[in-house]
Amino acid sequence: MTRRMRASDAVLALWPAAVLTAAGVAGFVGLLDWVRENEELARVDQPLLELLADQRSPGLETFFSVVSFVGGPAVLPVVVALIALVWWRVSRSWWEPVLLVVAMVMSTALTVVLKAVVGRDRPADVLMVVPGGESSGSFPSGHTVGATTLVLVVGYLLWHEDAEASWALTGWVLASAAIIAAVGAARLYLGYHFLTDVIAGLCVALAVLGVVVGAERWHDLWLERRDPPARPRALAAADEDLVWMRDAGDDGDAEAAEAERGVEGDGR
């Protein structure tokens, strides 16, 4: 029987999602304000790209170009599709793969809309490895949004499946940090994004993760209300336990009778 959803249960389930989403939105809005006012971290954008452009080498250009390509729109959707397919084949559950795909579609849609709304220009062509190679809006970094959303959402869903596998979670966190750092560094080193673009991409991914956490925890709550666990019942005594108790009682009665006869004999 389905139990009624209580407001307190919903709040308890959704507060982590609200915190993550609020943190992502607040970070994005704060960075956007710095960019528009050319304050705080935005003042580092141009000098940092000029410094990186002066330090380029053929080997690092090749390495970061490969990283950027793998984390871009040509390869990342294929990676997501493969992960979702393998997940479904192994777990035979459609919920997590669909949630991952929806999260990636959401992050892509948000990136396209935010780029168009903010309308920040890309760095100057002279700072790009391939001048004019990127022409869409600069804020936020779409590569960073996509790669970060993928590793964060997959990591959370894996942890949700087995929260006790702390060693696996630690390994995934380290790998995720390396992937995010590599993609962000690639976009900066190749001159296609400013530092604030990359950090804004992290904020968008964090907000998307909040939505995923909320959907997953609400799903758990709905399943719990649909199929509530059975109430614990008193354990029935096994037949052998009852036999043992009867034997123990008989032995006790016999010992008491024998002791009573001994007392009467002593009295005589």
Image (cartoon, rainbow, N blue to C red):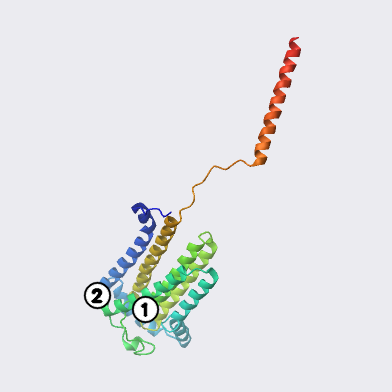
Residue kind at label 2, given as amino acid type: Arg
Left or right? Give the position of 266 relative to 242: right
The x and y percentages for residue 166 are 52, 61
The x and y percentages for residue 98 are 44, 71
Q: Quadrant of residue 114?
A: bottom left
* Secondary structure state at the residue bearing disc 1: helix
Left or right? Give the position of 71 relative to 89: left
Disc number for residue 229: none
Where 12 sits versus 143, above or below? Answer: above
Q: Quadrant of residue 112?
A: bottom left
Q: Which residue occupies the foreground of this view, 222 or 117?
A: 222
Q: Quadrant of residue 122?
A: bottom left
Disc number for residue 36: 2
The x and y percentages for residue 191 are 37, 83
Where 57 sits versus 170, above or below? Answer: below
Q: Which residue occupies the foreground of this view, 16 or 97?
A: 97
Please give the name of the residue rendered at 34% of the width and 53% of the height, measured from the top-left corner: 7
Chain-order first, disc 2 or disc 1: 2
Disc number for residue 142: 1
The 10 Å Cα crowd at callout 1, few under 14, some 14 to 19, many 20 or more, is: many
Where 111 sits versus 259, above or below? Answer: below
Q: Which residue occupies the foreground of this view, 41 or 91?
A: 91
The 10 Å Cα crowd at callout 2, few under 14, some 14 to 19, many 20 or more, is: few
Count of residue discs: 2
The x and y percentages for residue 232 are 51, 46
Measure the alpha-carbon separation of dots 2 and 1. Answer: 19 Å
Residue kind at label 1, given as amino acid type: Gly
